[in-house]
Image (cartoon, rainbow, N blue to C red):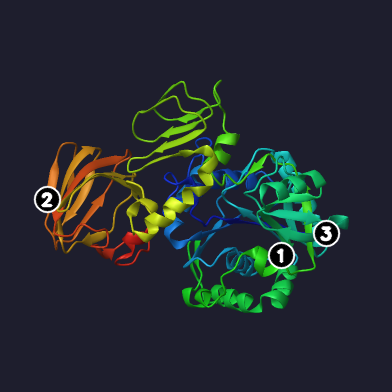
Amino acid sequence: MYKIQPVILAGGTGSRLWPLSRELYPKQLLPLIDETSLLQTTVLRVCQLADVLAPVVVVGEEHRFITRSQIDALGVVSAYSILLEPLGRNTAPAVCGAVEFCALTDDDDTIVLVLPADHLILRQEAFAEAVRKAAELAADGAIVTFGIEPQSPETGYGYIERGEGGSVLSFKEKPDLATAMDYVQSGNYFWNSGMFAFSIKTFREEMEIHAPEMLTAMAEAVRHGMRDGKFFRLDSKAMASSPSDSIDYALMEKTDKAAVVAANLDWSDIGSWKALWEISSKDDQGNVTVGDVILEETRNCMVRSESKLVATVGLEDTLVVETADAVLVAPLSRSQDVKKIVTRLKKKQRDEFRIHRTVFRPWGSYTVLEQQPRYQIKRITVYPGKKLSLQMHHHRHEHWVIVTGTARITNGDETFLLHENQSTYIPSGVQHRLENPGVIGLELIEVQNGSYLGEDDIVRFDDDYGRGAREEVTEAE
């Protein structure tokens, strides 16, 4: 009897869901539908399957701590692994690296089940049945893709053309509307979900034929990788030598072993604000609202507030998303074009495409309350039992005022406790550390002043989370 090894791909930035989804806090880590993130929902879905191994989650290095904290918060699995990509090389190297990692402990007949972390699937029993069918085909040597039975002529998805016996005749790029209508009417085309199942043996054999350079590079990336608790770091030099390609182009469109399992899962990849509006609960006027929102004569809109009151009057078919540092307004029908805004923000090197005002760290979070050329004010939250690195700054001084909880402070040669409404001053060049020794959250206000206030002005001397001297600036946590 074969074993099933789930592999969850949790990379990507979800740029079409900006300004909520950012490079360092992407959509798979966001609670878009309920209180759980899409990643957490995917982990729960996998854990409900029968006779599966503990999941392997593939993420970028910068998302490692928040990924671990979200999985641990579920309390449903303990033996999982997080495979860290030192750089993005598209889905094919990610899958290939995951397979090579699984091969360290699993036999060749193990079925690898590849699932994106940012999909919504509402029909769990139908999903389990589709996995069962796919695993049986994979055990017989097929490389199986899951085809979603189309509910409408969607132009935002690629399509799979099914042949006799479940074989794949072709993969189709995202079509125009007329072509999509033809696909749906034929009854033989399915949305390409990006979910796959195959045995380790079959995948390796087919990659050796169709993408040998990638297979060699990712095998080296695993061979020279490093285990760090639940984390496994792929070797950056080896991975950089791999071609960058999607799994569809690198393998699925070339192999003669591709098969498709048709599935009706109430599935969505939530690839745009309109897609999120379509699957969300609506009021009597067709509106989806989140947060502090007041509507007047508004119909068929999505209005989301993250930090302040948002009011609308006389809107129809419109998207309004407010965050602490950005507001997006667009026709719902143009929600796919939000990525154009993100592209422009990247070209201008603006922070709004990359981070939120609130930034998550392995020890807690901080929120930027005020930012000016020579001073900055933050609200810092530290989880119980956690501490920041022992560090110092070259260009800024810091004032800490405790708001809630108890702080253990290292300030130069002194270590002492501070309580609510007490404070300390840390000059530039002085080693310091902040720790929460209590059982409730620690909250404080930090006032920075100096000639340079960038997050890369951090020199670490000791850190509980394996971060280097100047790694903080690239962290999502």
Crowding around mark 3 (Cα neighbors within 10 Å: few <14, some 14 to 19, many 20+) is: some
**Does residue 457 appear left or right of residue 82 in this picture?**
left
Q: Amino acid at mark 2?
A: Tyr
Q: Quadrant of residue 438?
A: top left
User: Where, quadrant-wise, is the N terminus in this rendering?
Assistant: bottom right
Residue 79 on image: x %, y %:
57, 55
Q: Quadrant of residue 396?
A: bottom left
- Work out whether 5 lies above or below 316: below
Residue 386 on image: x %, y %:
33, 50
First in sequence, mark 3 or 2: give its number: 3
Q: Which mark is residue 131?
A: none
- Identify which residue, 474 or 323, lies in the foreground: 323
- Work out whether 120 lies above or below 83: above
Farthest residue to the front: give it.
178
Label 1: element kind: helix
- Identify which residue, 342 or 223, lies in the foreground: 342
Check disc 2 and report the residue beneath it.
425
Residue shown at the point (24%, 62%) measured from the top left: 458
Check disc 1 and report the residue beneath it.
252
Q: Nearer the viewer, mark 3 or mark 2?
A: 3
Whole-angstrom CA distance, mark 3 to mark 2, is 68 Å
Total number of numbered discs in the rendering? 3
Residue shown at the point (52%, 25%) measured from the top left: 299
Label 2: element kind: strand
Q: Amino acid at mark 3?
A: Ser
**Does residue 188 appear left or right of residue 47 in this picture?**
right
First in sequence, mark 1 or 2: give its number: 1
- Work out whether 99 lies above or below 214: above
Check disc 3 and report the residue beneath it.
167
- Identify which residue, 95 or 78, lies in the foreground: 95
Q: Amino acid at mark 1?
A: Met
Residue 32 on image: x %, y %:
51, 39
